Amino acid sequence: MSTTEQHTGFPRSGSLEADGPVEVGTVPRRPGAAVGRDRAAAPGRLDALTGIRFVAAFSVFMFHVSLVVFDPFANTSVRGVFSDMFANGGWVGVSLFFVLSGFVLTWTAGPRVPVLAFWRKRLLKVYPTHAAAWAITMIAVPGTGVAVALANLALVHTWIPDHSFFMSVNSPSWSLCSELLFYLLFPFFLPLVRRIPRRMLLGALVALVLSTLLVQLVAQALPSKPLAPEGYPISVSRYWLEYYFPVFRLPEFLVGMVVCRLVRETRLLKINVGLAALLALGGYVLDSFVPFDLSLVTVELLPIALLVGALANAEQGRSTRLLRSRLFQWLGNVSFGFYMAQAPVVIYLRLTVMHHQLYGVGEALAVTAGLFVTTLALGAFLHHCIEMPVMNRWARSRKALRTKGATS
């Protein structure tokens, strides 16, 4: 096991691959579809979903800081409360961002998706930031073997059922492997999802949520020992299959796609944002009381779907005003960089610089705030100096580049 693997302790966290403000695309209507109920062509933006990215990103960050290897609190009672508060933040954040990915890509897709151009744009969106964070982590926390490091750099490491691989280098990058698989399949999933009869959309949503239980049934065939090094009550092989194996994370992306159609074409998810948030909070709390396998994805997935749908439907309402503010728009847009910066910052500062020193409550809160500010600063750098320049230079279509050249 490499130095990075020994120290990361970042077992579950979300992929915060940001797409900027969410704008409406177009979806072809089925013959005879009711125009009044199909809002696919309605103008507008979903800034609330941009803002909610940072809420999820922050909960993931606090989950990471609350892990025993990084927790700065000396008082054992306070440490226990701190850990309990954020114990579920990592895997709840993961599902939220996977659902958001499915929703946003479906929302912005036109009648036809140019496959090669789509793949190119998605790769340019995530890979440069990943490569930069990988390099920073390799420098800040050296000691990873060549094979493990290269597998992580190539984003194939979660296809390998070896803990030293799927939890390697900048370990939160594991979720990008699942994102890339979804990007690969999205152009083929989209027409299938669009063909689902409107009356069957809600049933499709429920079926996708229940399909996560099948993953746990399959995992029961795997050995129950050895247990995961993180101390969770699950074997390494089951932990990998249920949580890290990219194929078994696809239902969450598909849930986002179905939720997008439900928002556009029905009123079934037009529910109060406060109620949806309470349901999501209830799922978060319930995760602490159900069998560990259920807490990974299943319990929170439906509440997350309802929350995303409620936020999308309430875009112009008072309940989403804070998420639509300029501050939260900026935070949402830098959240992918913020996510990718967490491991190198927290590992380096807490273990290399502070040597895992514990502090009184006031000092520990100051340490946590310092970790947050430093991570946010590095995340903003990754967004503004790497992600956006790459996207502006290479991710736009040739037609757009020719138009710019002709008018400049």
Image (tube, rainbow, N blue to C red):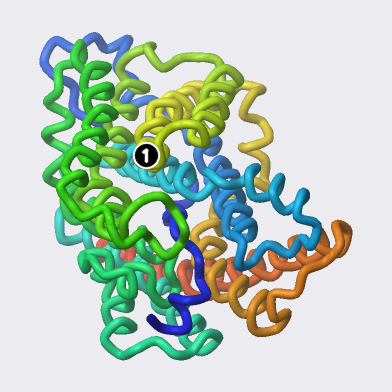
Query: Looking at this view, is 248 or 316 the one in front?
Result: 248
Number of marks: 1
Where does the image place residue 327, in percent across and percent down from the top left? Answer: 69, 48
The residue positioned 55% from the left and 25% from the top of the image is 282
Where does the image place residue 38, in percent across and percent down from the top left? Answer: 29, 17
Picture layout, residue 407 above or below residue 355: above
The residue positioned 48% from the left and 23% from the top of the image is 310
The residue positioned 55% from the left and 15% from the top of the image is 272
125 relative to 212 in the view: left or right:
right
Where does the image place residue 293, in percent across and percent down from the top left? Answer: 35, 41
Query: Looking at this view, is 155 or 390 the one in front?
Result: 155
Tell me the SS state at disc 1: loop
Look at label 1 and name its amino acid. Answer: Val
217 relative to 271 in the view: left or right:
left
| Quadrant in the picture for residue 101 | top left
Q: Quadrant of the C terminus?
A: bottom left
The residue positioned 22% from the left and 47% from the top of the image is 248
Picture layout, residue 320 above or below residue 188: above
Q: Quadrant of the N terminus?
A: bottom left
Q: Is residue 179 visible?
A: no
Q: Is residue 322 visible?
A: yes
Which residue appears farthest toward the front when viewing the image? 225
| Quadrant in the picture for residue 295 | top left
Residue bearing mark 1? 297
258 relative to 305 in the view: left or right:
left
Q: For label 1, count other residues whose C-alpha is less than 10 Å away and answer few (under 14), some (14-19) or many (20+).
A: many
Picture layout, residue 358 above or below residue 249: below
